[in-house]
Image (tube, grey):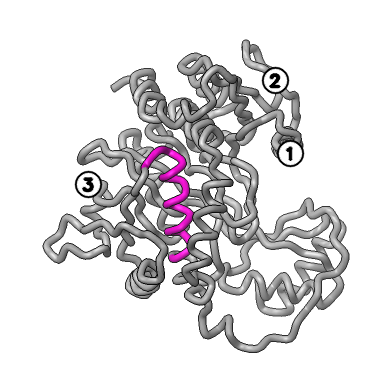
């Protein structure tokens, strides 16, 4: 199947979601063009393919000036492009955006979408970048809600859920079944293997046994790379829809992630995916799902013994712009690391980029923050 036919299939698959009350209105989706391993031209090619295949889309390039019929917002760096992208989203001039290497706050994670090779079935991977919680089992439980929200935004009325057999899967299954017993509706899928449980094996990844496959973010990120590049030798992601939109309670923007290795077909698919989420009102769908889960007691099920321990309250210092990233802190202690900086008067936020957890500080505080984190054993 050539690239144009593959992209056409993506748009056909998403057509129903794109028609949800928005036909006749052009939906603006921005795409940042800097940072790709394949160059700006490859991203532009994917954006132009997306615009060509759906006349209801207004695709806006955010990056250096190029020869293209698409609207353009000129920016000369990735940081500038991200800031401009956020401004356009906040102003309502963009309904959604597609970008690379974007640091979501802890609590927000992306839900990807793949086509399974065995049967050509679409399946959601929850999650693929970002992190929904600092601890594994609570993260898996939250990922189920996130995945269900995105699946419903794409038109599935009763999506089924399976839990990939990773560390913490059994504990997450018990908590999700308890949540379902308390009134939050979850339809559990069955593995294709003989045991017929909701715990999914590698076979189920190929067959697409559930509509939504629950896994930790690092596993989901690895799977996205395999499913999108297994036909190309790995250096070029040619298949799929990208790593999906960031979702989480209180998160209002629709920002879909692609990899630096994503090629034009995946860029086009990601734009279609982002547009479908915007057309359906994904943030509102997630808010409704989270409220239903909250009424069923999900917050009680997310509490771990470590979290329940009494900790001295540390208040953050006055907020300031955080333009510098510090990587290398383990996700399990990243919140503690941020509080350590607060204790020393340095304002810090936590986030999750495509390459792992990050602490965000003001540029002028970065050197002292590094010293404190190394001294505290966090780096």
232 to 44, vertically: above or below: below
| Element class at badge 3 | helix
Quadrant housing the N terminus: top left
Which label number is shown at residue 90? 1
- Residue under numbered circle 3: 207
Residue 123's spot in the image, x, y percent?
Answer: 34, 44
Q: Which residue occupies 21% across, 58% down?
A: 191
- The single residue placed furthest to the bottom in the displayed view is 310
| Element class at badge 1 | helix
Report the Cα–Cα distance between label 3 and label 2: 41 Å
Which span of residues is magenta-colored?
A: 141-156
Q: Which residue occupies 53% across, 53% down?
A: 288
- Residue under numbered circle 2: 72
- With 42 as the anchor, is 86 left or right in this view? right
Camera-side residue of 77 and 111: 111
Residue 107's spot in the image, x, y percent?
Answer: 59, 60
- With 70 as the anchor, is 177 left or right in this view? left
Q: Which residue occupies 28% across, 41% down?
A: 116
User: Cβ–Cβ below 8 Å for labels 1 and 2?
Assistant: no
């Amino acid at each position: 199947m050539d690239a144009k036919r593959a992209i056409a299939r993506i748009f056909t698959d998403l057509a129903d979601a794109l028609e949800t009350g928005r036909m006749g209105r052009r939906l603006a989706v921005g795409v940042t063009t800097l940072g790709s391993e394949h160059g700006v031209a490859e991203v532009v090619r994917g954006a132009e393919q997306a615009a060509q295949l759906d006349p209801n889309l207004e695709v806006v390039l955010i990056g250096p000036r190029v020869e293209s019929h698409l609207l353009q917002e000129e920016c000369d760096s990735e940081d500038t492009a991200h800031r401009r992208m956020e401004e356009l989203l906040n102003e309502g001039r963009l309904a959604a955006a597609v970008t690379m290497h974007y640091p979501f706050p802890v609590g927000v994670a992306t839900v990807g979408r793949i086509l399974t090779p065995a049967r050509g079935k679409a399946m959601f991977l929850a999650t693929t970048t970002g992190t929904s919680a600092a601890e594994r089992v609570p993260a898996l439980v939250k990922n189920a809600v996130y995945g269900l929200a995105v699946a419903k935004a794409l038109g599935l009325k009763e999506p089924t859920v399976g839990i990939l057999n990773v560390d913490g899967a059994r504990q997450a299954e018990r908590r999700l079944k308890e949540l379902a017993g308390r009134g939050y509706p979850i339809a559990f899928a069955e593995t294709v293997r003989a045991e017929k449980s909701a715990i999914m094996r590698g076979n189920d990844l190929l067959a697409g046994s559930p509509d939504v496959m629950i896994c930790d973010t690092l596993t989901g990120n690895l799977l996205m790379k395999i499913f999108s590049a297994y036909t190309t030798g790995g250096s070029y992601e040619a298949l799929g829809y990208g790593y999906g939109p960031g979702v989480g309670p209180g998160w209002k923007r629709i920002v879909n992630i692609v990899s630096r290795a994503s090629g034009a077909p995946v860029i086009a698919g990601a734009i279609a995916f982002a547009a479908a989420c915007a057309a359906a009102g994904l943030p509102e769908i997630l808010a409704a799902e989270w409220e239903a889960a909250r009424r069923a007691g999900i917050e009680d099920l997310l509490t771990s013994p470590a979290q329940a321990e009494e900790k001295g309250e540390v208040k953050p210092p006055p907020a300031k712009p955080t333009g510098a990233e510090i990587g290398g802190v383990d996700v399990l202690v990243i919140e503690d690391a941020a509080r350590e900086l607060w204790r020393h008067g340095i304002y810090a936020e936590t986030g999750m980029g495509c390459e792992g957890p990050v602490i965000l500080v003001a540029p002028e505080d970065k050197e002292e923050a590094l010293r404190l984190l190394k001294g505290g054993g966090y780096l």
